[in-house]
Image (tube, grey):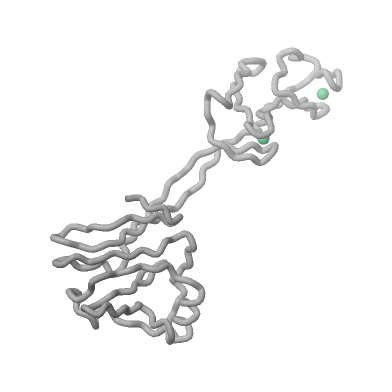
Amino acid sequence: MSDVFYWVITIGDEGQTIPQFDYETGKVNKITSFPKNIITKIAWYPFTQDIINKIKSAGIDTSNFIINPFLPKYEINIPENAYPVIEPMKEGWVDVISFQKCLKCGHEFKFNPEEHKTVFVKHMGRETITCPNCGGGDEFVCSNCGFATRDNTDYPEICPKCGKKAKWKFKRNIVNQTKIERHMIYKLGYVQNGQLHGITIKENGDVVC
Ligand SMILES: [Zn+2]
Ligand SMILES: [Zn+2]
């Protein structure tokens, strides 16, 4: 059972259309009731709340159905000697994305060495990244008074704020993070001579090919 589309087939010479779920009662029409070779067209429509309500009222479990408003309606004519793919084929995968987060302003960005790197090969020999949103970055903090500076080269011994001998603590404000992105594509079409013809749709409605 597909979770975002339901099918609508057109059969016979008269062009009668039969939806997977009856538009009035929500009841299931079984695809196996129709010989494949009389299907002339198949359409996949994304679920709507209205249809899901109808299906629910027919006593069918709809918990796996997802309403994705980005998905297009898609229909395709079935050539002779071909048969439709009834259930869209789903392919899912996961990407691990690494990115930087600025703890000063919360901005998330992808580190670009040309734009974001400020080299502070200074007091503690560190290189730091500059946040493209707030301009902040890793800092040296005076352990006496909390004064923070991105570059403490000019005052290695004495803190300019409290005037005391400073112990500089390195405070990391740009941190590396990762997140997981889940992707799903749907392949719709028909099979002819063992080959799938049709299109691939992303979850955001973009047609890939
Ligand atoms: Zn920032
Ligand atoms: Zn200080």
The residue most toward the front is 14
Q: Is residue 20 left or right of residue 149?
A: left
Quadrant of the frame with the N terminus: bottom left
Residue 21 found in image quarter: bottom left
Q: Position of residue 200 (x, y in %)?
A: 33, 55
Residue 161 found in image quarter: top right
- Name the residue at 24% across, 67% down: 84
Is residue 130 among the parts visible in the rendering?
yes
Vertical order, 54 against 200 (above or below): below
The residue most toward the top is 154
Q: Is residue 122 left or right of residue 161?
A: left
Q: Position of residue 163 (x, y in %)?
A: 86, 18
Is residue 3 among the parts visible in the rendering?
no
Q: Nearer the viewer, residue 167 or 132?
A: 132
The residue most toward the right is 162
- Name the residue at 82% across, 26% down: 144
Total count of labels: 0
Q: Nearer the viewer, residue 12 or 36?
A: 12
Taking the image in four quarters, ligand 2 sits in the one at top right
- Name the residue at 15% across, 60% down: 194
Q: Is residue 172 left or right of residue 32?
A: right
Q: Position of residue 119 (x, y in %)?
A: 60, 19
Q: Is residue 175 left or right of residue 26?
A: right
- Name the residue at 46% across, 68% down: 66
Vertical order, 164 against 2 (above or below): above
Vertical order, 95 against 2 (above or below): above
Q: Position of residue 188 (x, y in %)?
A: 30, 61
